[in-house]
Amino acid sequence: MTAISDTDYPFALCLTHDVDRPYKTPVHAVFYALADRDPRHLRDLLPGRNPYWQFEELMTLEADLGVRSAFYFLNEQPLRDRPRSDLADPQALLQTVGRYDVRDPAIERIVRQLDDGGWEVGLHGSYHTARDRERLAEEKARIESVLGHEITGGRQHYLRFDDPETWRHYRDLGLAYDTSLGSTEAYGFLHGDGVLRPFDDDFVVFPLTLMEQTLPDPGERFDAAWAACRSLLDAAADGDAVMTTLFHPRLFDPREFPGYRRLYRRLIEEALEMGAWVGPPRDCYRTFLDGSAREDATNRNHRGSGIDRTGNRSITK
């Protein structure tokens, strides 16, 4: 039995966005111009151009549909404060390109605008925090200092988490949920159709059902991408499921990433037409899970151990 099986909703659709890179830097522009053999990327070197800043467009899209979502913000360490091993790790070095600070005035403004408008603002734990409670606490406190109140949950960058240590850190820091359990390579209900309670208490895990990069490219194969989304909606309705999606904001730039904005809108429209509850994980938690019976909200295929990690980025693999 899932979190919403006793409600009037056939399923829940939780909408999330990881704010990895809100700025297209000169490094990005030159890299993609060379990699894609497309000099049009160089236009983004001009002052005032930043196609990765899609907050207002996303807010308008969701407000038009009467829904809200969650935005998870990063608080990454500068290179000088990172482990020396990062200097030999291309993936870790990549984290320094386009790094931002939630205390920058433009980011502060959008964080508060999201919060004032009813969107959820949460934690996107940085690359090395899966086993570092102190660093997670610092990142959480930094977001909360901008918001002026506590946050409810979040997701780890690159889905790098340690089961169960990272979840224990989240819970002990006062967070109610995490949504890092998922895959960067496959979509679907890979970890059951409900939320998980790894400690049999009020802390929950929302498994990630769909990251947009696992779909066929909607700019080239829109019908195939939509067919995959529709299949997930049908499965969610059949199973009274909690379905959680991740769409990165920068992919809503229609020139560089055509098709994603259209696909996201159609996903929400179809879910609403099917009668689903649609919103951020925070609101799903507060509406259906906070204080609910443990067994009703716990996925029947999980009892806190032996999770199938196929395709996810748990660092315990």
Image (cartoon, rainbow, N blue to C red):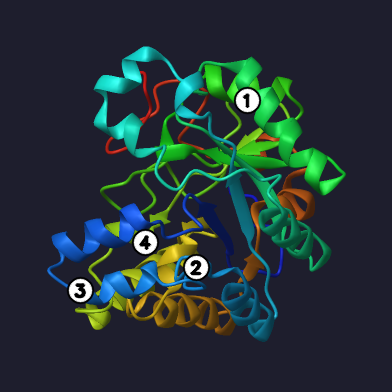
Residue 160 picture location, percent across and down: 42, 31
Q: Secondary structure at mark 1?
A: helix
**Which is more foreground, mark 2 or mark 1?**
1
Mark closer to the chain start, 4 or 1: 1
**Which is more foreground, mark 3 or mark 4?**
3
Mark closer to the chain start, 3 or 2: 3
Q: Is residue 103 left or right of residue 232?
A: right
Mark closer to the chain start, 3 or 4: 3
Q: Are marks 4 and 1 in contact (CB under 8 Å)?
A: no
Q: Amino acid at mark 1?
A: Leu
Q: Amino acid at mark 3?
A: Pro
Q: Residue shown at 65%/35% (left/top)?
A: 295
Asked whether 56 or 64 is in front, the reply is 56
Asked whether 268 or 241 is in front, the reply is 268
Q: Secondary structure at mark 4?
A: helix
Give the quarter of the figure containing the C terminus. top left
Q: Is residue 164 left or right of residue 150?
A: left
